[in-house]
Image (cartoon, helix red, strand yellow):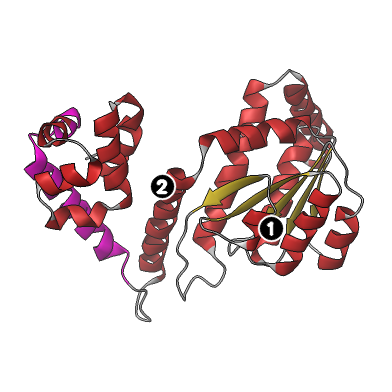
Amino acid sequence: MESLVHKIRFSLEFMGPGEKKIGEYLLTHTGEIIDISISELAERCGCGDATVVRFSRRLGLSGYQELKLRLAAEINASSSINSEINKGDSCFEIFKKRIVDISESLYSTETVLDPNSLELASLVIKKSDRIVIFGLGNSAAIAQDAAHKFLRLGLSAQACCDNHMQAIIASHLKRGNVAIGISHSGSSKDVVEALRLSKACGATTICVTNQGASPIVETSDIPLFTKANETKHSILAMSSRIAQLALFDSIYTHIVLNYDKSSMQAIYNTEFSLQPKKY
């Protein structure tokens, strides 16, 4: 059976203003529906009871009561899997819990990622003379993966994962260049300072960070938000890293599909050059 949360998420664009408010509220306050009446939900969303009923029926449900029951069942099913990882858990049980965490972070990221900002980031990256991606620690692998993708498109891209080199490179950027800073916390001092210096030199700055106010957002022309809650077991921040990878992959794919043929030609040239390296 299709997840009702997923169905709500993908039905939003076809809903009227009142129904859309209900859908957006439920996606960010899913657990609250269990304890509130139809009138309370309508009041919180600034609509009438009839709109809540219409919203429920649009999803193929009989009414608000079935909506509550279905969402409650999904919450219980999710929490039964996404419980605290225990010492006695098998590796496969831990894998299943990780899948739930990662899936949740991807869907949560969808709710906080601004479509216009993502579109603009894709545009400026494609048109830039030079792209530098700053990342340290856990973010270094994401920076390298992003640079690898952009290089395949024939773009001038470089991942910089050393804090001294970040400062040096940032000081030589100029108008027409793009500097991208990756920091889940948004408080990685060296990455923030590299972006600040890049911006002062005229480069367009983009940050990829978890939702919320942070130093990296303040120095970014285009903030791109993810949403992932890391636990004490997630030392390597897997959920947030998967969300960041998905974000860069979306930009890469958008450039391939929506700009001139040069991107496709660059990909062909890349694959052709790599053929002798494979059996």
In the image, 97 versus 110, the foreground residue is 110
Q: Earlier in the sequence, mark 1 or mark 2?
A: 2
Which residue is located at x 61 percent, y 40 percent?
249
Seen in the picture, residue 112 relative to 97 is either above or below; the reply is: above
Residue in the foreground of this view, choosing between 211 and 259: 211
Task: Please give left or right for residue 97 compared with residue 271 in the image.
Answer: left
Compared to 68, does 125 lie above or below? above
Q: Nearer the viewer, residue 235 or 24?
A: 24
Magenta span has 81?
Answer: yes
Percent position (x, y) of residue 205? 73, 46
- Give me the residue at 80% from left, 37% from top: 274
Q: Residues within 10 Å of mark 2 (few under 14, many from 20)?
A: some
- Quadrant of the drawing holding the N terminus: top left
| Three-letter residue code for mark 1 | Ala
Q: Picture quarter containing residue 80?
A: bottom left
Single out the mark in the foreground, 1 or 2. Answer: 2
Mark number, residue 205: none
Residue at 77 percent across and 62 percent down: it is 193
How far separated are the C-alphas under marks 1 and 2?
22 Å
Which element type, helix, strand or loop, lies under badge 1? helix
**Circle 2: residue type:** Tyr
Residue that carries the numbered disc 2 in the rendered image: 107
> Where does the magenta region start and end?
55-83
Picture coordinates of residue 77 (x, y %)? Answer: 22, 57
Identify whether 200 is placed above or below 193: above
Q: Give the labeled residue for mark 1.
A: 141
Q: Please, which residue is most extreme toward the bottom here?
A: 87
